[in-house]
Amino acid sequence: MKVSEVVVRILESEGIEAAFGIPGAAINPIYEHLGTSRQIKHFLARHEEGAVHAADGYYRASGRMALAICTSGPAATNFVTGLYTAQIDSMPLIAITGQNVRSQLGKEAFQCVDIAQIARPVCKATWCITEAYQVPSIMREAFRVAREGRPGPVLIDLPLDVQLADIPYMPEADAPLPIAKPEPDRRLIARAVDMLLGAENPILIMGGGVLLAGATQRFIEFAEYLSLPVITTYMATGGIPAAHPLHVGHIGIQVGSPFGNSFFLESDLIMGIGNRFGDRHTGKLEVYTRGRRFIHVNVEPSHIGRIVPTQLGIVADAGLALDALLEEAKTRTDSRAPSRRVANIPQDRARLARKMDYDQVPIKPQRVYQEMNEYFASNAIFTTGCGLTQIWSGQLQSIAAPYTYLASGGAGTLGFDLPAAIGAKIACPEATVVAVMGDGGFGFMMEELAMACQHNVPVVVVIINNGYLSLIRQNQRYAYEYEYAVDLTYNGLGIDFVKLAESFGAYGERVTRPDEIRPAFERAVKSGRPAVVDVVVERDADAAMGGSLDAVREFD
């Protein structure tokens, strides 16, 4: 059997149903067999980075891996940003790149670049397979590596002559490799429960690893049993409903809330499960750690003690750790009533919430998020990338369910939003999927609107249009007291996003008044097509942020 057919057979065996990519001469042998697959549907991207983001969004929404595929040279190097975005947020996907023939490797031949070496720092593993007989075993190992432990992307580079080689292969004798999940040390679990029961003001942190482990309900059950307040990291948004009585909200120097930050600073014991203690979450470590002890549960051993001083570290799958914690807690105490501090969370959270119900023109950006909260159903899926638009989203959007808020967290990738939304919609066709973007961010990957239109993927793009690279404008203004090269306007507003959307075959509408926002959302959804709603907002609005949890600057 030709290697190119073996590759597709293995992809099918591993459960791949969606492929996002762009064909080319060095990958066409595999495309021949993708084209005859009854299981895998291919979606033609317009930029290779967009293909990876789409595969990434597909997984974030559904928990099912997808394929990103492209040819060699600049096509392969265009994968790097997408791979980095997936890697830092722990999202597994399989990337396959074509390569020149083996005899041309290392000779600077046309479109012949060592992508396995280039991508290695932003992948869990990479391979350039030069022995055709190794393709089946390496592909199975690639899927195992992508899924096991801390998930992440893997890349396989296939020279053209390897793809065309014949090898003996029996599909019925080949199968996916088992995935191991590390179990927690029960002695450490007992110590953790001791520390939680002995603390005066403990807090649980739900990290993105809890969602990756499919353990959000187990986390909530444990928190409810001991009446422990819950902070969600940005990557865990939706893991516990925003309105849950134990949910403090986000903390941090950008997407954190005033209530969340102040509540955290009054704590004495922090138990983080499946989180990384990233710098946008912690801010200045001296403020974050002062007077507090830390318990850290993570599937990746190197993450424990890497950033915060950890009194107790537990290496384990988040779901298995939560099972053990709840079991241990039930042997120690009956379900506990909340302390006064915890019982007051709902009213204190509401009292300190940021204002959103502005009525003026130009539209305040906060009003757009209020309208999104009120119009879209709780099962709608949102994507967002980077900038003030993303920061306001993290501060103001009310998310009720896991796997419905898909954000570029660690990378902050402009342009992630649109292709990720396309991938999410393909994975979850019954859901309304909304890409929440700035006008600057939309410019980075707007060509992927063609992928949505060609394949009839009706995502809704909401552009918060202030005519600026506004996060950079805000940094220039307050950190350096100048403004330069951040104004995106020309000939009036700049890009006419309505005409742009219509040129692709999408629905487009511009909004300039608050009372127009919700009807525009309704028309966009009812159009049944990819849709762009361009909301023109106040140009100089700023987002709350700062350097430490006790020094976040708020703006009206």
Image: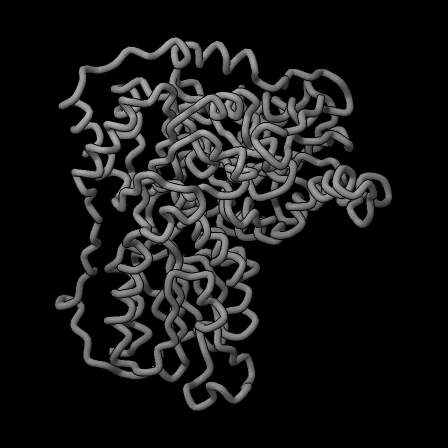
Q: Say which quadrant the C terminus sits in.
A: top right
Using the image, determine if residue 85 lies above or below residue 107.
above
Quadrant of res 535: top right
Left or right of residue 190, residue 525 in this image: right
Q: Whole-percent x and y of residue 415?
A: 59, 49
Q: Whole-percent x and y of residue 437?
A: 61, 39
- Colour scheme of this structure image? one colour
Left or right of residue 205, residue 12 in this image: left
- Seen at 33% across and 44% down, the residue is 63
Q: Say which quadrant the N terminus sits in.
A: bottom left
- Nearer to me, 501 or 260: 260
**How many circles with numbers are drawn on the protein?**
0
Q: Whole-percent x and y of residue 320?
A: 21, 39
Using the image, determine if residue 437 lies above or below residue 227.
below
- Nearer to me, 353 or 495: 353
- Seen at 37% across and 35% down, the residue is 294
Does residue 359 appear in this view? Answer: yes
Does residue 254 appear in this view? Answer: no
- Seen at 64% across and 41% down, the residue is 387
- Nearer to me, 120 or 194: 194
Q: Whole-percent x and y of residue 308?
A: 43, 42
Quadrant of res 385: top right
Quadrant of res 62: top left
- Seen at 45% across and 30% down, the residue is 380
The residue positioned farthest toward the right in the image shown: 491
Left or right of residue 373, residue 537 in this image: right
